[in-house]
């Protein structure tokens, strides 16, 4: 398995605390690239630019990526274009959010 694929899998462990869904399923991760030395660059966004948990989410993404086998260094770059929309979520995220709403009184 390529380093990029392992990092994508690791990033599924980073949960957006406000939404309760991982950042990959939410569509917040736009790109993961790695060079031969294992230096990884992650390009991602947040649901809103003024997200109060931005530092926490970015730090978690960097930490889980750094713990991935084959990774040497990690750089996380926050971008705001393209702007995130709910249409970027995958079906699993949509289903998880729906089930949370249905179980909330």
Image (cartoon, rainbow, N blue to C red):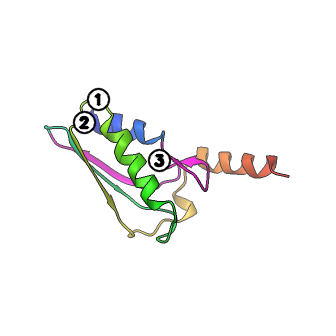
Q: Which residue is mark 2?
A: 71
Left or right? Give the position of 104 relative to 46.
right
Q: Residue at x 49, y 71 (%)?
A: 50
Element assignment for label 2: loop
Q: Is residue 3 above or below residue 89?
A: above
Q: Which stretch did the figure color magenta?
A: 14-35
Cα separation between marks 1 and 2: 6 Å
Cα separation between marks 1 and 3: 19 Å
Indicate which disc residue 50 carries.
none
Mark 2 vs mark 3: which is more N-terminal?
Answer: 3
Instruction: List x then y, in percent, for residue 72.
Output: 20, 38
Quarter occupied by the N terminus: top left
Q: Which residue is mark 3?
A: 24
Instruction: List x then y, in percent, for residue 75.
Output: 26, 52
Element assignment for label 1: loop
- Asked if the residues shown at circle 1 and circle 2 are in contact, with their CB atoms under 8 angstroms apart, the answer is yes
Instruction: List x then y, in percent, for residue 91.
Output: 60, 47
Q: Residue at x 49, y 50 (%)?
A: 23
Mark 1 vs mark 3: which is more N-terminal?
Answer: 3
Mark 2 neighbour class, 10 Å CA radius: few under 14, some 14 to 19, many 20 or more: many
Q: Is residue 83 above or below residue 60?
A: below
Which corner quadrant of the image does residue 66 belong to? top left
Is residue 33 rendered magenta in the image? yes
Q: Which residue is mark 1?
A: 69
Instruction: List x then y, in percent, for residue 55.
Output: 42, 58
């Amino acid at each position: 398995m390529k380093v990029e694929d392992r990092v994508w899998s690791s990033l599924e462990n980073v949960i957006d605390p406000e939404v309760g869904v991982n950042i990959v399923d939410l569509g917040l991760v736009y790109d993961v690239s790695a060079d031969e030395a294992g230096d990884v660059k992650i390009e991602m966004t947040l649901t809103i630019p003024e997200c109060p948990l931005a530092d926490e989410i970015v730090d978690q993404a960097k930490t889980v990526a750094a713990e991935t086998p084959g990774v040497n260094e990690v750089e996380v770059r926050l971008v705001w274009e393209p702007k995130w929309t709910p249409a970027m979520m995958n079906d699993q995220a949509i289903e998880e959010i729906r089930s949370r709403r249905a179980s909330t009184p």
